[in-house]
Image: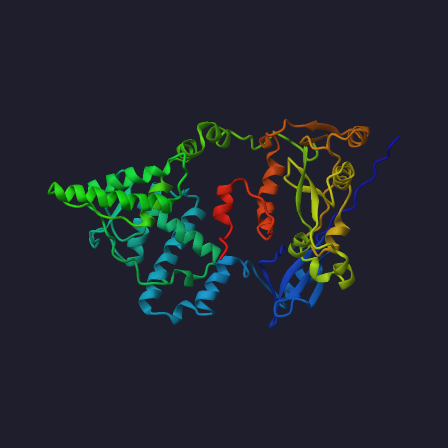
Amino acid sequence: MPRSHPLPTRSHTHSLVSLGRTDRYREGTRNYIPVFSDSLTYTFAHEEDLDRTMVLSRLEVWTRLRTGKAEVIYYYHSAPIQRTLAVHGDKTLNSFDPKVQHDAQLRVGLIDKYEAEYRNGTRLPFSENLEPYLDTWWDQLHGLDDTKKKKNGRRRRTGQAIAEVSNAPSWKTFKRDYDKYLASGRNPVVFVPLHHGPGSRTVIPCRASELFHQKMAREYLSRLRPNPAQVHAGYLAELDLENDRRRAAGADALLQFSLTKTKNAIGRFDEFEVMASREGEEAALKHFRDVKGSFDIERPGAHIEIDEWKGDLITLLVKTGVWAYLPDVFIEALPKTLRVCVTVAIDVATRYVLGIKITPTASAEAIAGVLRMAMVDKTDLSRMVGAETDWSACVKPDLASMDNGAAQVSGHFITGAQSIGVTIVRQPAGDPARRPFIERLFGIIGPLITHFLDGRTFASVHERATTMPRPT
């Protein structure tokens, strides 16, 4: 008969400090980057020498921050903040022209008023309903009331109507300013203009020239599948003939548009119409069909997907950083050309990679090894390769979905999987949409690696011609 025991009273010891590689940890004049963390410690690398590391417990980090011996600058190494530092350096807003300071302070003032209203409970979504608030706040920042308001004639487009308003920015401009301000760590220097624009805008008033250009741009919708440059060359040839006919008839010549104009016109075409016209309606229907993005899986391990991908061994070693640490004897023993098979298992519920196996050829043993790896803890492996977080996920899958390769249909693998209670489902050939998550994973990782290979294959001759450089 089980006995119940009272649990000991929990006492607070220290708060957990959340740090990542985009943050800066500073002690005095020394700056560090958090490179690894586990349940007990943080590992920091010195910014000027990444080989110099320091390991502190979470309690010690919290104590140093609390006593003022250290500080954390969150998102210091993020792309927006580094871009601001690269453009303006360590400058503050006070180092710029007074007019620039005034304009930046107005934008910051709008953001402060927006956040004050939000804290007071007023729900202000980014939409046209925000416009009256922006106008009111803008007037308050300028010290204007209803008797002192001035209209400068600038107009803002609000849906289908065009209304005359003050100089307050539109809600879309305010949204861009707000996102940029938060991403930069609330640094008002991001509002310092980088140029004196905008320049003048040329409006083409000739409707006949626009219609002729649109008609010729639709030559892109051809089964011959010309590229935009070829379409533009055909447009210029037809334009010369059309202008000759118009001059003979005493009419004005049509205006000539640039290649950029032709590309923009092509970019506005409906994507389904483009593919149906150039590659056939059947290909368009297959490409734009509804792909199920979720299989309503409620828990990890209920459904996993397993697939294989082939690549060059040396390229994989170089891209993963292993090549620099291999001994010379091992490198000399490697063959110059060797394609290996990478077998991967991914969990559908969490999109988490559960196992990876690299073998010379596809085999049932590799599939079984990946399935075995999915069910064991891989923390030691992740720490050995220097990962930022532990690879600790492990689960016994209920169902494994894969294709009809020779390794997957092997009786050895199927018998072993069924003996531990894993149901094997082989999807129909030629239908990758039934395994969307593993296909999406290879669709992202594959091109990042294969474009370094001379023997890379392509989906079509046209793709190869547009991707590979021409021989000189």
Q: Position of residue 278 (x, y in %)?
A: 42, 34
Residue 207 lies, with reference to residue 291, above or below; the image says below
- The quarter of the picture where residue 148 lies is bottom left
Q: Residue at x 69, y 66 (%)?
A: 53
Q: Position of residue 169 (x, y in %)?
A: 32, 51
| Front residue (pair 360, 49) | 360
**From the viewer's perspective, is 40 left or right of 429?**
right
Q: Residue furthest left?
A: 250
| Front residue (pair 437, 301) | 437
Residue 90 lies, with reference to residue 150, above or below; the image says below
Q: Position of residue 195 (x, y in %)?
A: 34, 63
Residue 159 visible here: no
- The quarter of the picture where residue 317 lies is bottom right
| Front residue (pair 150, 184) | 184
Q: Residue furthest front?
A: 472
Q: Which quadrant: the N terminus?
A: top right
